[in-house]
Amino acid sequence: MNLAVYDMSGKQVGSYEIDPAELAPTVNKQLLHDAVVMYQANQRQGTFRTKSRGEVAGSTKKLYRQKGTGNARAGSRRSGTRRGGGRIFAKRPRDFGWRMPKKALRAATRMALAARLADDEVKLVNGLDLAAPKTAAVAKLLKALGIAEKTVLVSPEKHNEMLWKSARNIEGVSVAPVADLNAWTILQPRALLMTTAAIDAFRATVAKVVAAKAAGLSVARGVGRRTAASKSAAARAAARAAAIESKPVVSKPAASKLAVDRKSAKRAKPAAKKEK
């Protein structure tokens, strides 16, 4: 597919060819859902707290006698069944965060961008270089591209302080370089605005992952390396084989010979006592 490339004034200056299947041949919706839920769960503070019946103020004296009043049985006014009492199973601060495997998160990021490209929700510009912070320049660009009233993620190749300062005062606009992209940041806004250099960097990272996978390597932080598990297993097998080859072979005496030696030793002991 061909995407139009615009300049800072909003005029089309070229086109960019890309196939979404290059980033992800298939889009796993369940994987995207799990990744988004994980990122949202990690943003929860979990600082809530309520009081149990042992923490609320009030007397623990029985409200009235057990029988004879016609009322239901009642004990402490702190009971969770009474108004103003403590909460049953009171809430406590907790951490809702959890983590998915790194490979799954990287795959979800690629699938998310491939899905946005397939839905034609990505706008490309040839550059976002600003000499000084200028909110009006970014607002004018968004208006020219028709995404001014939407939530927008602006993604340059690297961190751009001038761009960040120019866009931070626009409601619904966030800035994140390619290295900070994930499934949640890509899927959450209504539109994406990327530079051609940024999408080139993303494609280069994907190509490195594909090449490493084809060569039987695992990728960690963008650098290919052999899996430690397979390497250590091969080393242990080689050491075990070398130990077996170098071990001397000791021949054991026959069982019948050992029995004869034991009998002769027993016969010799009484003779030694008689000599004394």
Image (spheres, rainbow, N blue to C red):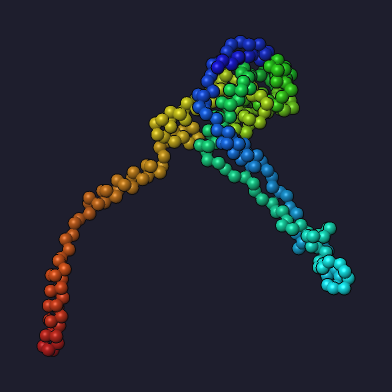
Residue displayed at 69% across by 47% down:
46
Q: Is residue 109 above or below residue 6?
A: below
Q: Is residue 31 above or below residue 260?
A: above
Which residue is more in the foreground, 176 or 77?
77
x, y percent for residue 77: 83, 64
- The quarter in which the C terminus is drawn is bottom left
Question: Quadrant of the rendered structure where residue 162 is?
Answer: top right
Question: Quadrant of the rendered structure where residue 7 is?
Answer: top right
x, y percent for residue 23: 52, 26
Residue displayed at 55% across by 41% down:
100
Residue 156 visible within the image: no
x, y percent for residue 99: 57, 43
- The quarter in which the N terminus is drawn is top right
x, y percent for residue 153: 66, 26
Seen as rendered, the residue at the extreme front is 70
Residue 40 visible within the image: yes
Which residue is more in the foreground, 175 or 163?
175
Q: Is residue 155 above or below residue 14?
A: below
Seen as rendered, the residue at the extreme right is 69
Residue displayed at 68% across by 43% down:
44
Which residue is more in the foreground, 232 or 19?
19
Question: Quadrant of the rendered structure where residue 50 is?
Answer: bottom right
Which residue is more in the foreground, 60 or 198?
60
Residue displayed at 68% across by 16% down:
145
